Structure formats: C-alpha cells, structure tokens
Amino acid sequence: NAGVTQTPKFRVLKTGQSMTLLCAQDMNHEYMYWYRQDPGMGLRLIHYSVGEGTTAKGEVPDGYNVSRLKKQNFLLGLESAAPSQTSVYFCASSYSDRRDTGELFFGEGSRLTVL
Amino acid sequence: AQSVTQLDSHVSVSEGTPVLLRCNYSSSYSPSLFWYVQHPNKGLQLLLKYTSAATLVKGINGFEAEFKKSETSFHLTKPSAHMSDAAEYFCVVSEDATNKLIFGTGTLLAVQP
C-alpha cells in the first residue's frame, strides 16, 4: 500500500543546476499538490493540479514548473536552482476538492539543498 | 483573507498529562479547520477536521478539538499524552470550497518520560 511516493528523498544541487522531483500516487486521486516546508513558515503551496493535463499556480510558484502528463504522476521542476529553494518539498494528493470531504495524503518529503 | 496562528512553537508535557495545543484563526466566512500531525521524517497525516457539523470533533489517537466561533479558536487536546504523540502539529484553515489550505507554522510537541 504505497500511497504517495516521492523521489528522490535527498538531493544536493549547485546554484544554477536543474532537477526534477517526481511524485507518484496509486490511489487514483484527481488532485495533486506540491508544497514546500521551511522552518517557522509552515507549508506553502507551490503548484497544484486538478486532473491529468492540468496545472495551476499556488502561493509561491516562481522558479518552479510542473507537469501532470499522467494522472498518477506530478513532476516538480527547478530550471535554475537558487539557494532560496533549499527546503523540504512535499507532494500530496486528494480524491476531492471539497473542503468538507477532501483529505490530503502526503508523501514523506524530499529534502533539497542548493549550495 | 484567511489565516491561522498557532500560539506556541514548542510545547513540552510529561507522559500521562494532558495536552493542549492552541490555534486561532481569522476568516471572513465560515471556515473548515483541520489538524495535521507530522512525525519525524514523515509526511503529514490528517488528525481531525471541522466542517460546520458538531463543534467538538474527535480524531485519531484520542485527540479532539473544539471549534469556538466566539473565540475564533480551534484548540487541540488530549487527556493523557503518550510518548508516541511526540511530533509536530499543524493547524490548517480552508475558507474556499477547494482544498487550497492555509497552514499554521506548527507546534512541536515533546513528551517527557
């Protein structure tokens, strides 16, 4: 029962390098999200998707791109990494966008360090 | 705009004593409120949620929270702490009819033996 799986779990980049974080869910959820978690700031929404082939900006989208080519996968890309993007990234999915039923299921996080 | 404030960044209790984690919210409309828990090196897990039904909400692992509109609060409580409760707890508000949630900054709960 995998749920939401993120790869890689850890990565160190140099400023200016690019990388992609992969999120995969096996619960047939329509909605998927990418958050970043920074000390003392809680979680902030980067981008989200309401279905295959769709993406939308969240609270802090600058410097990131996303794609949802398959329903089960949601990719987060950094084209030119900056030290300010050092963070822990969480992917989440849900089966409903209704606030009274939707429960987010989270992956275990990907810790990214940009030197 | 909606927001949520967790009043304590760190709380330490002894095993077997009550737990109180405080949360206040700001919302123009009737909000939905959630508590999520994050154990070390794990993702977040839903603990409980309030969505305009009963104001006293029971969650997993013996936790409960009470929605108090007059005080704009949604404090999380547990009668007796267990070592396994040591984790970070996030209060979350959603005002819109979507799952775009606003997270508090978290409260780290330590449980002493």
Image (cartoon, coloured by chain):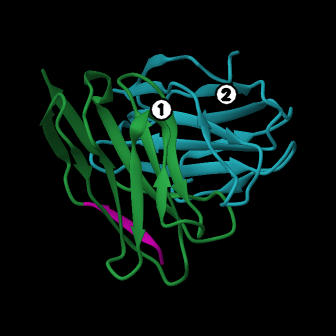
Residue in front for this viewpoint, B16 or B100: B16
Identify the disc placed on residue A23. Answer: 2
Chain containing mark 1: A
Vertical side of B9 occupied by B83: above or below: above
Image height check: is B49 above or below A10?
Answer: below
Q: Residue at x 32, y 23 (%)?
A: B84
Chain colored green = B
Which residue lies under the disc numbered 1?
A16
Q: Give me the chain letter of mark 2.
A: A
Q: Which residues are magenta?
A: B1-6
The percent position of residue A34, horizontal first and vertical second, equals 59, 42
Q: Relative to residue A87, is residue B1 drawn left or right?
A: right
Residue B111 percent coordinates (x, y): 18, 29
Are dots 2 and 1 on a single chain? Answer: yes
Q: Is residue A45 left or right of residue A2?
A: left
Q: Where residue B51 sits: x, y (%)?
A: 59, 64
Q: Is residue B59 above or below residue B91?
A: above
In the structure shown, which secondary structural element does the residue marked by tag 1 occupy? loop
Label 1: few (<14), some or many (≥20) within 10 Å? some
Indicate the amino acid at tag 2: Cys
Q: Quadrant of residue B25?
A: bottom left
Specify which label sits upstream in the sequence, 2 or 1.
Answer: 1
- Residue beneath the point at 53% across and 43% down: A35
Q: CA distance from mark 2 to mark 1?
A: 23 Å
Residue A90 — which label? none
